[in-house]
Amino acid sequence: MTPDLFQPVRLGRYELANRIVMAPLTRSRSRSDGVPHSSLAAAYYQQRATAGLIVAEGTNISAQARGYAFTPGIYTKEQIEGWQPVTEAVHEKGGRIFVQLWHVGRISHPSLQPDGALPVAPSPLRPDVQAFTETGFQPCVTPRPLETDEIPGLIEDYRHAAHSALAAGFDGVEIHAANGYLIEQFLRDSTNLRNDIYGGALHNRVRLLLEVTEAVSRECGGDRVGIRLSPVSPVNDIGPDHDPAATYGYAVEQLNAFGPAYIHVIEGATQGPRDAVPFDYEALRRSFKGFYIANNGYDRALAQQTLALGHADLIAFGRAFIANPDLVERLRIGARLAAPQRETLYGGGREGYSDYPALTPAERAEAQSVPA
Ligand code: PHB
């Protein structure tokens, strides 16, 4: 049978209802201490639980990991308790939910850091990016390079966050190694100028990703771990790697040792064109033994074609899930998609978050009468 978006599929130990993934989306509606607004977030995620898999928004693994105001964390008891109603609400509807483990590295600001400290990074290179702080946008600063002997503590933060994620009822975790954040700052030679065992040669630049994946997989089991990658995305002022095919190909091959369930790949520029920089995603996919989740700018037709050609195992939709809680149903019947409101993307309450309506029965009937 030709693979299809609406077919159930087994991912690791889980039987997913379909091949549609809700991609992680930062919505900045948590408290300043990283505790999610439980009832708000539970409603929002439960409305979207018909996705085969939800990957909850980027969630800080430690106080140092934070780079955006009002983003959630997953390292304190209060945060774990804040997430529990959310995972329960998704499970109640038969959904599955992973959480994305996030450390922003240099994409932060002292006002978001414990004791006003400098953000950390592999090397002291200032990104030309505005950080979203509690008092508005402020330019990022030159980060403090991590000492080699701080890395074990950093890996322990990832492990502890993975442990906390399971305690909060998440079905697994996704390691954020994309979009110009900490792990990608180590991966690319444009942002990693180190000369210790975490920099320089390719196997050194990949070391942090592998050590994090090993620690997290030991905690959760590799089949409950995914890794997000964005081999050519320029987002967050990260310069291109001099040889993305070699860097990301090697990284993915080495990841196989830990048996991750999936890689989740942003094809092209994050939230931008899919084809700005040529890259052979098919080769990347062939280097990896687990599932390949394709993401970025997919519509129904491209998603179905990609699955039918065997170029991906699942397709992730991000922006489309914001204003379409019933995206799975809309894709199934070929209904029109609602557009999100820009002003309510980040911050605020239920408006522009958990108040986007599903199709009414009448709208559904009308959509079904028009051939998709
Ligand atoms: C964003 O808030 O725009 C954002 C956050 C995390 C990402 C990418 C984009 O990985």
Image: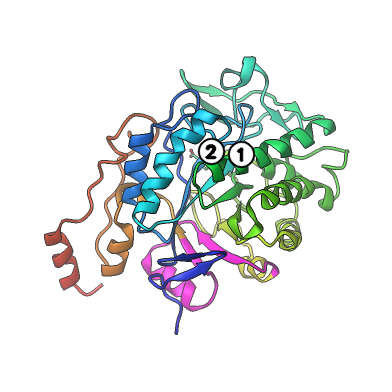
Q: With 119 as the anchor, is 29 left or right in this view?
A: left
Image coordinates of residue 151 in percent, x first then y, are: 78, 35
Q: Quadrant of the N terminus?
A: bottom left
CB atoms at circles 1 and 2 under 8 Å apart?
yes
Residue 183 tag number? none
- Residue at the location (61% across, 44% down)? 162
Disc 2 crowd, CA 10 A, few/some/many (<14, 14-19, 20+):
many
Of tags 1 and 2, the one toward the viewer is: 1
- What is the distance, in whole Å, between disc 1 and disc 2 at their CAs? 9 Å
Residue 251 in sight from this viewpoint: yes
- Residue at the location (47% across, 70% down)? 9
Extent of the magenta region: 287-315
Does dot 2 land on a helix, a strand or a loop? strand
Q: Is residue 26 above or below residue 22?
A: above
Q: With 203 as the anchor, is 368 left or right in this view?
A: left
Does dot 1 land on a helix, a strand or a loop? helix
What is the residue that sits farthest to the bottom in this orientation?
1
- Residue at the location (58% across, 30% down)? 66
